[in-house]
Image: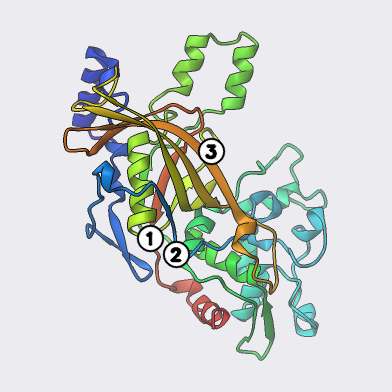
Amino acid sequence: MKSTLLAITVLMAMNSNASVIKEAWNNSNNPDRMQVTRNSRNFRIGQYNYTKTFSDLPLEGQLTTRPWSGDYWPTHKGGITYRWNEGSWGSDAYGYPLLEDKEVSNIESTANLSPAEKFDLYLGRYEFPLTKYERERTNIMKTIEDSEEYDSSFEIPSWEGLCHAWAPATMAFVNPKAVTVTNKNGMEIEFGASDIKALLTYFLHYDKSSTSFFLGGRCNVDFSKLDEQLSNDEITQEQYDRKKESMKCRDTNAGAFHLVLTNQIALLDEGFVADVTRDLEVWNQPIHGYESEIISEISGKSEGAARGTVREVEIKTTMNYTTEIGHSFSQVIPSYNSNANKYYHYKIELNEKDEIIGGEWISDNRPDFLWKQTIPEFTGFFAPLKEVYEKSIL
């Protein structure tokens, strides 16, 4: 949230010369917001200053440890109540009746239950509190025709899910394997690799003690609808450009993006998360590498460049990130199966010290926002998850 003073400063600059603030980063795009380094699984604030000298920033980099992948546990499938290993399709995999006491006592195998059901059983909570809570969060029973909660007008967007927690989990935790554990009543609970990934993801979603560090702002404009309005002459080209190039929909400043990408990956060997879709939909992905190519360099300052610019460098960058994959019980899926790329074209603006002070996007494709977060300790309801997780990485 901008301070009143900053808002007044921005407004004055816009009134006097709109191009002055276009490509210099504002407060929400200041890369200093991401200058935290990590000790074990916990981030320490203020222990690192990003290298801003362009010639000191590598043109390529890859994380030593690639983030693992998995499902983003979409809301329209009931989140982590989805019985992914059962072989059922459609609503049978998430609209099932909850197990009753007699069924629990007679169950022969837990392998096909959902991650939420398994954790409830592991806790000895046969009233299934997590499963019920997740059903309420997702409102999944409103989509089940036989349910008392069914609402024919209710729809869940297919892109909604737990990617905001899955992405940091892929970097915070070691890739788990299947493990069988016994609850306090002697019942064996068979956790597949995807079950543990689901619970680690949900733990980060559920926990409120972690701190997040954001760069940029979320664009809430649906570009496909905007394109449709323009093609149907419902809006003018000027209105189209104004909405698409609004402050938030301009997205992360190109110079700030290049600073974060190069420092985090090549110099710190630490991943971060990016929303790789520019408009309304949010797809949080863990970033693990990049390759950049210098296309051209010019001396001087173009119109709209940041104050103090003496040189501009045109760059094309391929950003590597981990994408979602299918479920797996015990198999460790090779990381290349989940590798994806985004291609960006932009200019960075340098001052007389060769420091990046701004940037401008050339490509229409660009990340919406960047972020990372601290990783909390296992406490509260999810404290017992620590034992399951640690056994899964032995």
Where residue 108 appears, x then y in whole percent? 80, 83
Q: Is residue 122 visible?
A: yes
Residue nearest the observer in this picture, 77 or 300:
300
Quarter of the picture holding the N terminus:
top left
Q: Are marks 2 and 3 in contact (CB under 8 Å)?
A: no
- Horizontally, residue 21 falls left or right of residue 390, namely left
Q: Amino acid at mark 3?
A: Thr
Q: Return the residue found at the far bottom.
A: 186
Residue at numbered disc 2? 64
Looking at the picture, which amino acid does disc 2 mark? Thr
The C terminus sits in image quarter: bottom right
List the residue tagged with mark 1.
Answer: 269
Q: Nearer the viewer, mark 3 or mark 1?
A: 1
Q: Which mark is residue 277?
A: 3
**Dot 3 surroundings within 10 Å: few (below 14), some, or many (20 or more)?**
some
Secondary structure of the residue carrying tag 3 is loop
Q: Nearer the viewer, residue 248 or 210?
A: 248
Measuring from the top left, give residue 316's x and y in whole percent: 45, 36
Q: Marks 1 and 3: in contact by CB < 8 Å?
A: no
Please state which of residues 185 and 37 is positioned toward the viewer in this rendering.
Answer: 37
Q: Which residue occupies 22% across, 13% down?
A: 16
| Residue type, numbered disc 1 | Asp
